[in-house]
């Protein structure tokens, strides 16, 4: 049997290593990776009947997160990419659902965020907007919580223990009316039909003794706008661009919102103008920084604290509601 020379053995070893690295780089794992995306201008996406797109040196920008299957190399060495976060599949695609269903839910959340953003902006501009509550929209189900596997994002809660539920306050009242550990019969509207699930409450990890079921919710409503507002966000999904949409719509309506600056914004917006927390803050902050934008409006609290860790020269402006965002931008224009 002919023996290989040391040089040939070394060459074979390098070749095999290259094959392994290539396979690790190309083959998808069973995990997902979150990656930064650059900030995108909202102006070209918004069309309002009878209004022209504003033209100034500034503009409102939204920022998204790339979400896809991680390769095996990315799963083993996520630090190879700046801002990369690798998560298990269950954190992106809840058990019992599919990737296609997740995309559909994200797009439905985007559609709702556009309607709500238009309503908030038009009200701020002095228009009359009708919004009739239809129930409580499930925005997110906390992993490992009692509601996990029973409730889904985009579910609309309409009854708890036989009583009608129209607002998030109604839901909180119903859950808090009974002690921790109690079971609730919850009726939800899902894909046009009603479903009943039984969910047991647990203790709120942040407020001792307060019962929760483990969902983040918003207001589902039938919204009637006095003007036709269209937003074409393409394949972008999720509710986190709501604040940016509302700011840009108000700019289209004639208000100087950006004051000549390029402004990035993220946050889910509700009908009362409140700005709720979102995910992917690390990736979004890095995306804003790489886009050369120096002001980033972020939901107050944990989101703002996380954004500051990756800001590196970007001014993080925490906001709790739409009016506060407008005041903050007006203040920035006077001080800088």
Image: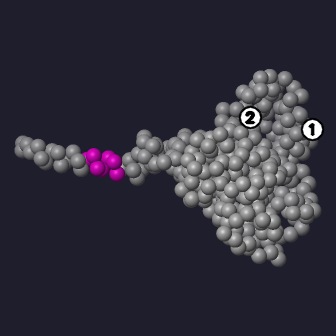
- Region of the chain picked out in magenta, as a range: 16-22
Q: Nearer the viewer, mark 1 or mark 2?
A: 2
Q: Residue furthest front?
A: 335
Q: Out of 194 and 112, give the one closest to the viewer.
A: 112
Q: Quadrant of residue 183?
A: top right
Q: Is residue 142 visible?
A: yes
**Of the residues under marks 1 and 2, which one precedes in the sequence?**
1
Q: Position of residue 119 (x, y in %)?
A: 84, 59
Q: Residue at x 51, y 49 (%)?
A: 69
Count the marks: how many? 2
Whether the magenta-drawn stretch holds residue 17 is answered as: yes
Residue at x 81%, y 40% (from the top left corner): 196
Location of mark 1 (residue):
163
Is residue 75 shown left or right of residue 111? left
In the rendered structure, the answer to whether residue 181 lies left or right of residue 308 reads right
Residue at point 13%, 48% (across, down):
8
């Amino acid at each position: 049997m002919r023996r290989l020379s040391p040089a040939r053995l070394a060459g074979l070893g390098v070749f095999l290593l290259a094959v392994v690295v290539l396979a690790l780089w190309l083959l998808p794992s069973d995990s997902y990776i979150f990656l930064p995306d650059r900030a995108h201008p909202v102006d070209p996406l918004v069309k309002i009947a009878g209004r022209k797109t504003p033209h100034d040196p500034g503009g409102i920008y939204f920022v998204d997160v790339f979400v896809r299957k991680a390769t095996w190399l990315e799963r083993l060495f996520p630090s190879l990419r700046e801002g990369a976060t690798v998560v298990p599949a269950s954190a992106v695609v809840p058990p019992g659902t599919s990737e296609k269903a997740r995309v559909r839910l994200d797009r439905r959340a985007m559609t709702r965020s556009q309607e709500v953003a238009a309503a908030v902006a038009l009200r701020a501009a002095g228009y009359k907007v009708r919004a009739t509550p239809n129930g409580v929209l499930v925005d997110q189900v906390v992993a490992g919580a009692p509601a996990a596997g029973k409730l889904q994002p985009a579910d609309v809660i309409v009854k708890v223990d036989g009583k009608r539920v129209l607002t998030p306050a109604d839901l909180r009242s119903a859950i808090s009316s009974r002690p921790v550990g109690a079971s609730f019969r919850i009726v939800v509207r899902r894909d046009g039909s009603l479903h009943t699930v039984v969910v047991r409450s647990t203790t709120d990890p942040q407020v001792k003794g307060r019962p929760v079921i483990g969902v983040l919710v918003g207001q589902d409503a039938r919204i009637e706008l006095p003007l036709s507002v269209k937003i074409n966000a393409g394949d972008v999904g999720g509710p986190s661009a709501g604040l940016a949409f509302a700011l840009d719509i108000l700019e289209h309506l004639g208000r100087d919102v950006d004051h000549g600056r390029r402004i990035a914004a993220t946050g889910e917006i509700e009908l009362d103008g409140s700005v709720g927390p979102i995910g992917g803050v690390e990736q979004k902050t890095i995306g804003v920084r790489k886009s050369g934008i120096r002001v980033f409006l972020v939901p107050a609290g944990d989101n703002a604290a996380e954004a500051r860790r990756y800001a590196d020269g970007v001014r993080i402006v925490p906001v709790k509601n739409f009016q506060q965002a407008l005041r903050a931008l007006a203040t920035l224009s006077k001080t800088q």
